[in-house]
Image: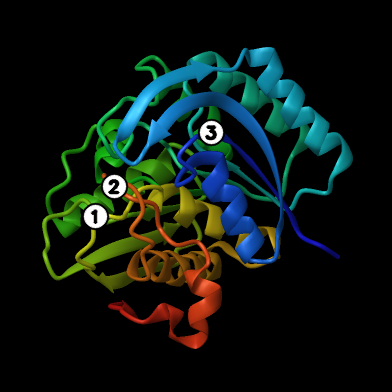
Amino acid sequence: MTAVALTIAGSDSGGGAGIQADLKTFQELDVFGTSALTALTAQNTLGVHGVYPIEVGGVIAQVKAVLDDFTVGAVKTGMLFSADIITAVAQALQMYGPPALVIDPVMIAKGGASLLQQEAVLALKEELLPIATVITPNIPEAEVLTGIAIETDADVLKAAEKLLELGAHSVVMKGGHRHNEEFAEDLFLSADGERFTLRSERINTKDTHGTGCTFSAAITARMASGKPAGEAVIDAKHFIQAAIRDGLKLGAGHGPTNHWAYRRLGESAGKGVVFVD
């Protein structure tokens, strides 16, 4: 049976992040992608030039239209913009009960523009986190969600444990924002006690637009295909590492990653990714 995934997120007119990145990733991983738009953005590699939210009723109508008709194996949320949208999406997902929910807590675009209203942070913590299968924050997002200043490995673990206490079943603490010039480390921790760290070599490139969206979309695709969270995260890390390494060199700013690199590179797609524990 064909696996189906749903992304609930914003549109990126530049095609590197948001709905566009999610659907490309689903396609590359043999998963049929469906979508519900939460906002339109006027965006390119140089930044976000405008954000135009969709009315809440329109967002939920899209979600229900998909879930009423398709057998969706996993749902991903990205840019949700407002507290009202977050609350409505959480209620709809609880009503339908999809097998897996991956939350990418999108807050700030690569160029620094805010993509989540301040009052929406509380709604994210109270409404969505308790039903999350996996949450994939970067370091700044984790600091906002937990109130913990993250500098050391111990801080990373403490923040991950805090996110589990808030209700998420598992968390991937992405290490790309930490100050290590040679490598980045992502910590996976689940409420079941599964724990591992993936270390990836740093790639000297400015083409990293949409990395968070693409990574979480790859997790979602693998979970829609039936893989458990830990295995899905490992596959997704290989996918995003290949996408960054084999860049497209598009645009004048932070260019998009290469969504077809994983398929083209084959067995070498995971180059530069290793377990460290």
Residue highlighted by disc 2: 254
Q: Looking at the image, do the residues carrying marks 2 and 3 touch, with CB atoms under 8 Å apart?
A: no
Q: Residues within 10 Å of mark 1 (few under 14, many from 20)?
A: some
Residue at 29% over, 37% down: 46
Q: Earlier in the sequence, mark 2 or mark 3?
A: 3
Q: Nearer the viewer, residue 123 or 8?
A: 8
C-beta proximity under 8 Å, tags 3 and 1: no
> In this rendering, is residue 201 above or below 104?
below
Contact (CB < 8 A) between labels 1 and 2? yes
Determine if residue 143 is in view. Answer: yes
Q: Is 155 on the left-hand or right-hand side of 219?
A: left
| Left or right of 2, for residue 50 | left
SS for callout 3: strand
Label 3 is placed on what type of residue?
Answer: Ser
Identify the mark at residue 53; answer none if there is no mark. none
Task: Identify the residue position indicated by label 3 in the image.
Answer: 11
Q: Position of residue 32 (x, y in %)?
A: 74, 55
Task: Tell me the distance, in whole angstroms, between the alpha carbons under discs 2 and 3.
Answer: 17 Å
The image's mark for residue 206 is: 1
Identify the image quadrant of residue 131.
Answer: top right
